[in-house]
Amino acid sequence: MIPVCLLEASSCSAEKQEIGVYHPRWSELNEPEKDFPEDKCLVTKLELGKMRFHIARDQKPLHDGDTAFKFNNNMVQTDKADKEAFDWILTPNFYGRVTSEKFPETIKSGMKYRVNHDDKEGGIPKEFLDEWLAIDPIEEGSKAIVLIIAKGIEGKLDISKSLQEALKTKKQNNAIQDYEILPTKHAVIRHNKYVKEGKKVYTFIHTAG
């Protein structure tokens, strides 16, 4: 009996190479990293506490320290060992960590896991929304924006009741196009889909639990 790999050596070799590159090191998301459109910011790799994404042509870092995460070919890889790298935002023109420099009220209020989903406290505070939108005002106005909130690999980071109400009000008043709150894996998949469709996407990504 002749092994299939002997008959199709080249395809088996390619398959082994792909498995070695994309699995199991990145357990949540493994997208190929080639032929990126220059104007698209796409998330390619994701696992607990860590991700990689491609910077769009005009995207700039929010903080000087964010350039330390930049890899070759406009790829950014976050650092699992750095707790300040668990929370990131991506907008059409900017990318970076959620720090006190641009999010002073958010950091002051804190983003803590809730003990249970009946708690009113904890999660992402209402202050985050205004600070987030202020990062990157766009010509079309906020009514063209889709907001995506990724609440962790296991969905442990919820959002405050006041932020939920603020998001709902903005959508009802056509102040934003839409918003979605999802576990991180599904949020980055949705982010990639909308970016490819040409939508104005603002994404918050929590890479911890």
Image (spheres, helix red, strand yellow):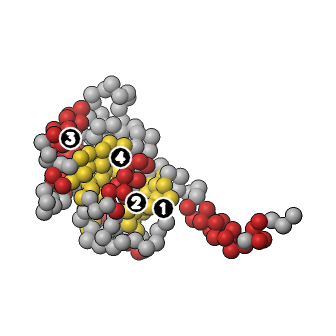
**Where is residue 164 shown, x and y percent of the image?**
23, 36
Q: Is residue 95 visible?
A: no
Q: Nearer the viewer, residue 174 or 99?
A: 174
Earlier in the chain: of badge 3 and badge 1, it is: 1
Are the residues flagged by discs 2 and 4 in contact, CB closer than 8 Å? Answer: no
Q: Residues within 10 Å of mark 1 (few under 14, many from 20)?
A: some
Report how far apart the C-alphas of labels 3 and 4 lie in the structure. Answer: 14 Å
Residue carrying label 2 = 43
Quarter of the image with the N terminus in it: bottom right
Task: Tell me the kind of residue under disc 3.
Answer: Leu
Q: From the viewer's side, name the closer residue of 22 and 63.
A: 22
Residue 33, above or below 132: below
Residue under label 3: 167
Task: Residue 54: name its quadrant.
Answer: bottom left
The answer, for residue 14, to whether it is visible in the render is: yes
- Marks 1,2: beta carbons within 8 A: yes
Residue 13 position, x and y percent, is 68, 70
Cβ–Cβ below 8 Å for labels 2 and 3? Answer: no
- On residue 123, the disc is none
The residue at 53%/52% (across/down) is 27
Give the SS element for disc 1: loop
- The amino acid sitting under disc 2 is Val
Q: Which residue is mark 4?
A: 150
The disc, 1 or 2, on the residue closer to the chain's N-terminal end is 1
Q: Earlier in the sequence, mark 4 or mark 1?
A: 1
* Residue density around tag 3, few if under 14, some if 14–19, many if 20 or more, within 10 Å: some
In terms of secondary structure, where does tag 2 sit?
A: strand
Mark 1 = which residue? 31
Residue visible at 63% across and 70% down in the picture: 14
Q: Nearer the viewer, residue 67 or 3?
A: 3
